[in-house]
């Protein structure tokens, strides 16, 4: 768990006592980095923490001290003693003084101080919602170190508060404000997260603690940040997602995808560090050689996917009403073959959908594509933009022009600036309008599938 005992014969000059948590009546001295904490043992023994088990060893003879038992191998064979233990086995018990503190390895003094704040805090302090970035950072440290040392209740509390903070709207006088790297919109209920580094820390602790609610809360913030298009933010997301590939697949795919669209010139700048930096002059991440290789692989895979898109429409599940008109007409005049007529209508609807989809996809290739009377240049590998434009037109046909056919359908679609292709729009009038709604739903689901699968495109 990172708990080690480190007897010291002399108080080293570089060691300092913590100004807040070196308590005069404390009974256990803990060293984290070069800082000494003197705290109450019972505080660390609560909640079934790892410290409870370690402190329970106090009644065991010195030859079987905490260090001895921690170093025992997994097969429970003969204990392995360290040299320092053999040399100091007759010294005072670990943690009894500044000369023999319990050493916590792999932690920061700031995180341990945050944990102690949570353990010693008054109820009014615990239940007060964080209102500053420093308080958010403290909660992240609490969650991280509480997870490491199995303070389950404290960990759960910290993660829950972080999730609420990320989801809630900030208390700002204006409805729209900018803080640091992430845009904040109080009326839209966006997060108070104000920097990419803080967002990275939130994501890391969500992954570390396997906290799905916090993970889901930070995902839309990442999406907004990445679509804002700042190269350094995208590179930061790529690095984070590369470290947690299995847990951050959607972020991995989206970050690589948006970086791919920036082109090789921007890749080179990001690799050399020749990009705009913030006023804080902090060190910025650079694009690695392996990441550039994966970008090239993604470009090739997405080029092929875009070429095949028009021939791969989403699977259409026909609405029951697609069969009824033909059946009712046949039965009304007493003719047989109602099932055959229904099948014919069903097939015609399916063929119309295939043609409509191909036409919509091909229209995104047109150099004259428009949106709100503004020209849009769609890159040949911009699969998501192509599919989103197709969905815009389908939505217009479903919601705004039910029942229109032929030229009228094309005119309605042109309100989004997308040009028709070979009579593809006319096919919308040959589809059952309920099936058209089902087609829109299938197309939207296809976008989600593509988004989740983007990570598979960027492989070495």
Image (spheres, rainbow, N blue to C red):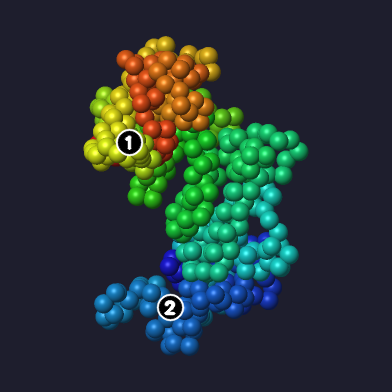
- Residue placed furthest toward the right: 173
Which residue is labeled 1 in the image? 333
Whole-percent x, y for residue 60 in the image: 44, 87
Quadrant location of the N terminus?
A: bottom left
Q: From where the camera sits, is residue 422 visible? A: yes
- Return the mark for residue 105: none
Q: Residues within 10 Å of mark 1 (few under 14, many from 20)?
A: few
- Above or below residue 148? Residue 360 is above
- Above or below residue 98? Residue 159 is above
274 or 47: which is nearer to us? Answer: 47
Q: Are marks 2 and 1 in contact (CB under 8 Å)?
A: no
- Return the mark for residue 66: 2
325 or 57: which is nearer to us? Answer: 325
- Residue placed furthest toward the front: 334
Location of residue 262 by image quarter: top left
Whole-percent x, y for residue 379 in the image: 37, 20
Secondary structure type for disc 1: loop
- Above or below residue 262? Residue 86 is below
- Residue at 44% in and 54% down: 207
**CA distance separating discs 2 and 1:** 92 Å
- Residue at 30% in and 33% down: 345
N-terminal label among 2 and 1: 2
- Residue at 35% in and 73% down: 71
């Amino acid at each position: 768990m990172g708990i080690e005992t480190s007897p010291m014969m002399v108080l080293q000059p570089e060691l300092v006592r913590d100004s807040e948590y070196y308590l005069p009546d404390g009974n256990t001295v803990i060293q984290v980095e070069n800082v000494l904490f003197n705290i109450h043992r019972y505080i660390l023994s609560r909640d079934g923490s790892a410290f409870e088990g370690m402190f329970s060893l106090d009644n065991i003879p010195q030859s079987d001290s905490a260090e001895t038992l921690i170093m025992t191998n997994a097969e429970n064979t003969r204990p392995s003693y360290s040299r320092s233990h053999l040399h100091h086995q007759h010294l005072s018990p670990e943690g009894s003084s500044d000369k023999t503190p319990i050493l916590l390895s792999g932690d920061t003094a700031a995180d341990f101080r945050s944990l102690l704040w949570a353990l010693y805090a008054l109820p009014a302090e615990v239940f007060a919602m964080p209102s500053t970035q420093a308080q958010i950072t403290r909660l992240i440290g609490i969650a991280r170190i509480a997870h490491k040392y199995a303070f389950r209740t404290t960990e759960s509390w910290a993660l829950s508060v972080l999730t609420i903070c990320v989801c809630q709207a900030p208390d700002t006088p204006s409805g729209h404000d900018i803080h640091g790297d992430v845009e904040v919109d109080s009326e839209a209920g966006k997060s108070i997260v104000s920097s990419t580094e803080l967002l990275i820390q939130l994501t890391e602790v969500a992954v570390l603690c396997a906290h799905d609610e916090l993970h889901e809360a930070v995902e839309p913030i990442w999406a907004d940040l990445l679509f804002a298009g700042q190269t350094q933010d995208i590179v930061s997301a790529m690095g984070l997602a590369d470290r947690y590939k299995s847990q951050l697949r959607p972020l991995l795919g989206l970050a690589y995808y948006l970086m791919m669209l920036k082109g090789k010139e921007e890749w080179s700048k990001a690799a050399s560090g020749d990009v705009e930096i913030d006023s804080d002059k902090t060190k910025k991440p650079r694009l690695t050689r392996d990441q550039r290789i994966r970008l090239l692989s993604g470009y090739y895979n997405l080029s092929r996917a875009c070429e095949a898109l028009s021939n791969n429409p989403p699977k259409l599940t026909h609405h029951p009403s697609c069969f009824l008109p033909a059946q009712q007409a046949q039965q009304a005049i007493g003719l047989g073959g109602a099932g055959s007529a229904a099948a014919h209508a069903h097939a015609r609807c399916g063929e119309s959908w295939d043609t409509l989809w191909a036409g919509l996809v091909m229209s995104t290739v047109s150099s004259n594509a428009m949106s709100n009377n503004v020209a849009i240049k769609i890159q040949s590998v911009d699969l998501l933009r192509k599919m989103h434009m197709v969905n815009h037109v389908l939505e217009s046909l479903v919601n705004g022009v039910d029942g229109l056919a032929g030229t009228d359908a094309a005119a309605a679609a042109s309100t989004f600036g997308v040009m028709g292709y070979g009579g593809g729009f006319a096919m919308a009038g040959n589809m059952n309008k309920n099936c058209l709604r089902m087609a829109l739903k299938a197309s939207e689901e296809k976008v989600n599938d593509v988004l989740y699968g983007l990570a598979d495109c960027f492989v070495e």
